[in-house]
């Protein structure tokens, strides 16, 4: 393949490749301040996010690579031991079970386990805590809601506690929670709370199949053009079987 064809294909691939999309959930307030689930000694915390908040990533879904939380105040370092698990759940917003094990979906995946930095030098004004996941999680909102499961084995008790941006109870909520201070408990102390952490998800959308079909068609076209170019460059005397020798 000649250089022009290769450049053209690279440009087309770049044009259809997915770009990271920021999804903010919940998308509406009112917002206040809270300390759960990090600024307490221990906690098991689950938060369900409505699939409708993720419609911007498209029907093919995408890979969640980062989670951001809104937090005000100074840099508080991090936590010694936090486990984060994501899954696609059939549970509705406001419909989490009081039994923790009944809420995650079959695709549950641990996306972080161990020490968790809780600060960011490249934060925006609203979201000041960036968490880069150990491994990306594939999520398709057409399959169900998103469940974030947080197991905090050793939180930070700050006085005063740095507030996390939290959705207060709202009639138009798109998130809800279940939680317990006791990590060993199979059931939640509080369930069905209409509110939760203000969260930003960084997602790499998966291109739709039609985009790949277009790229394949373009590749075939470029290959044909390149082959025709090579054919056209053959000298006319070679195409006619060569010149006659001396008589």
Image: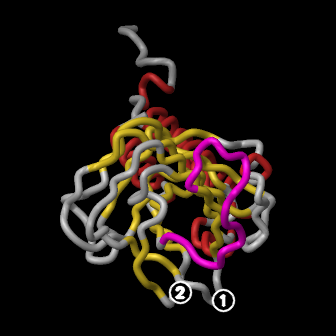
* Residue under numbered circle 2: 28
Could you say whether the residue bearing mark 1 is in a helix, strand or loop? loop
Q: Where does residue 222 sit, x and y in percent of width and height?
A: 51, 45
- Disc assigned to residue 67: none
Q: For this rendering, which residue is in front, 215 or 102?
A: 102
Could you say whether the residue bearing mark 2 is in a helix, strand or loop? loop
Q: For this rendering, which residue is in front, 116 or 220?
A: 116
* Residue under numbered circle 1: 172
Query: Dot 2 surroundings within 10 Å: few (below 14), some, or many (20 or more)?
Result: few
Asked if residue 153 shows in the view, the reply is yes
Asked if residue 207 shows in the view, the reply is no
Do the CB atoms of the residues marked 2 and 1 lie less than 8 Å apart?
yes
> Does residue 16 appear to the left or right of 146 in the view shown?
left
Which stretch appears magenta? Answer: 181-197
Q: Residue at x 59, y 49 (%)?
A: 182
Question: Magenta-highlighted stretch: main secondary structure?
Answer: loop
> Does residue 99 appear to the left or right of 217 in the view shown?
right
Q: Residue at x 40, y 8 (%)?
A: 247
Q: Looking at the image, is 247 positioned above or below residue 189?
A: above
Question: Of marks 2 and 1, which one's residue comes earlier in the chain?
Answer: 2
Q: Where does residue 242 sit, x and y in percent of width and height?
A: 44, 18
Q: Residue at x 61, y 45 (%)?
A: 216
Q: For this rendering, which residue is in front, 237 or 130?
A: 130
């Amino acid at each position: 393949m000649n250089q022009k064809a290769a450049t053209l294909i690279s440009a087309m691939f770049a044009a259809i490749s997915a770009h990271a999309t920021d999804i903010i959930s919940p998308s509406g307030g009112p917002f206040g301040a809270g300390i759960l689930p990090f600024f307490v000694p221990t906690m098991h915390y689950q938060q369900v996010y409505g699939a409708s908040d993720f419609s911007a990533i498209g029907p093919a879904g995408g890979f969640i690579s980062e989670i951001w939380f809104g937090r005000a105040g100074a840099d508080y370092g991090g936590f010694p031991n936090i486990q984060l698990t994501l899954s696609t759940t059939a549970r509705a917003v406001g419909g989490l079970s009081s039994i923790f094990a009944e809420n995650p979906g079959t695709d549950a995946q641990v996306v972080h386990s161990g020490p968790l930095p809780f600060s960011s030098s490249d934060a925006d004004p609203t979201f000041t805590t960036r968490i880069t996941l150990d491994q990306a999680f594939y999520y398709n909102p057409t399959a169900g809601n998103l469940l974030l499961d947080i197991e905090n084995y050793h939180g930070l008790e700050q006085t005063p506690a740095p507030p996390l941006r939290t959705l207060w109870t709202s009639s138009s909520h798109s998130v809800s929670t279940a939680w317990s201070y006791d990590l060993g408990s199979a059931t939640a102390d509080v369930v069905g709370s209409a509110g939760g952490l203000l969260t930003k998800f960084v997602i790499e959308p998966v291109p739709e199949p039609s985009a790949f079909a277009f790229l394949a068609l373009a590749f075939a076209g470029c290959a044909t053009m390149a082959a025709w170019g090579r054919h056209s460059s053959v000298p006319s005397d070679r195409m006619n079987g060569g010149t006659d020798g001396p008589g």
